[in-house]
Amino acid sequence: MSVPCALAISAADPGGGLLATDLLAFDVLGVLGSGVVTALTSHGIRQAGPSHDAPVAILNAALEAALAIRPPSSAKVGLLTTVPAVRTVARALASSPFPIVIDPGFVPRSGVRHLRSTVVDTLVRDLLPLAALVSLNLLEASALAGFAIRSEADAKVAARRIQSLGPSAILITGGCAEGATVIDGLLDGRTWHRFESPRSDAPLACGAGGLLSAAIAAWLARGETLPDAVARAITFVHQALAAGWPAVPLK
């Protein structure tokens, strides 16, 4: 049986997150990884920094090569920093037969907004309708839904509103909320799946959303259903953080 492949499309950052985390998660979960760099960024955990965006011609060529050389069984789209980048990725993935997980990362846990409103608007219009799953933290989901999410009931309403923009399913993660328990909610079609887990105090927990969406893409590449992929990914993230990810990654 051949080993499945997952494609990561995102920026590269100096902290080893974003694209590097995606590829590492793929490898740990037994999936071959291909990567396309959309930008070189100096974004930090608590502040935005300057970026150098990949020229559109190079980005387009890299996407074509990645899709041809090692056809993926799933893809994760992470940080895209410009309108042309969003449009280029959307065109490349428009007819893809595999599930696409989108984790835009435009408002990290710090609350520092990384993307201009024009980029977010283009992402919503051109890329979200292609997604099998859009993974958002509470801040991002609140921004797209147009109101502050303060409860699980709010999250359900927000997920339905965001789903109306075109994606098949919405995952709203609760790591930005307070309390000892984290509630993540998945709207898959018309079904709401609730995932409850203890909050991690690991230092890398602030980057757990990107790790989670990469793990979901990996499990989808391995043939899991979306609810099972999300459940397995949540378990993986908590185990990995507890073990000191990325120094001690777990299978």
Image (spheres, rainbow, N blue to C red):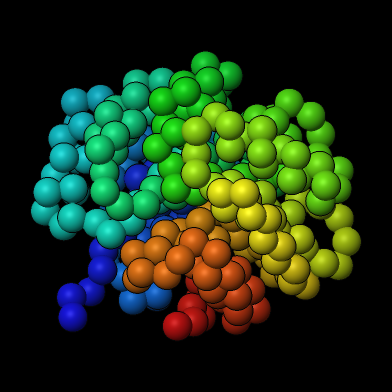
Is 228 situated left or right of 86 in this image?
Answer: right
For residue 58, say whether it is visible: yes
User: At 58% from the left edge and 19% from the top edge, which residue is drawn?
Assistant: 117
Q: Count how many numbered circles sit on residues in the image.
A: 0
Residue at the limit of the structure toward the front, as seen here: 190
Note whether 228 is above or below 91 in the view shown: below
User: At 11% from the left edge and 53% from the top edge, which residue is drawn?
Assistant: 69
Q: Picture coordinates of residue 37 (x, y %)?
A: 31, 42
Note whether 235 is above or below 135 in the view shown: below
Task: Quarter of the image for the C terminus: give it.
Answer: bottom left
Note whether 236 is above or below 131 in the view shown: below
Quarter residue 90 falls in: top left
Is 96 situated left or right of 114 in this image?
Answer: left
User: At 18% from the left edge and 48% from the top edge, which residue is drawn?
Assistant: 67
For residue 25, say whether it is visible: no
Residue in the foreground of this view, choosing between 193 and 173: 193
Task: Quarter of the image for the N terminus: give it.
Answer: bottom left
Quarter residue 149 falls in: top right
Note whether 5 is above or below 149 in the view shown: below
Is 11 situated left or right of 62 in this image?
Answer: right
Q: Picture coordinates of residue 234 (x, y %)?
A: 60, 69
Q: Picture coordinates of residue 15 (x, y %)?
A: 50, 53
User: At 48% from the left edge and 78% from the top edge, which residue is drawn?
Assistant: 249
Q: Picture coordinates of residue 36 (x, y %)?
A: 28, 45
Residue in the foreground of this view, choosing between 23 and 149: 149
Quarter residue 186 falls in: bottom right
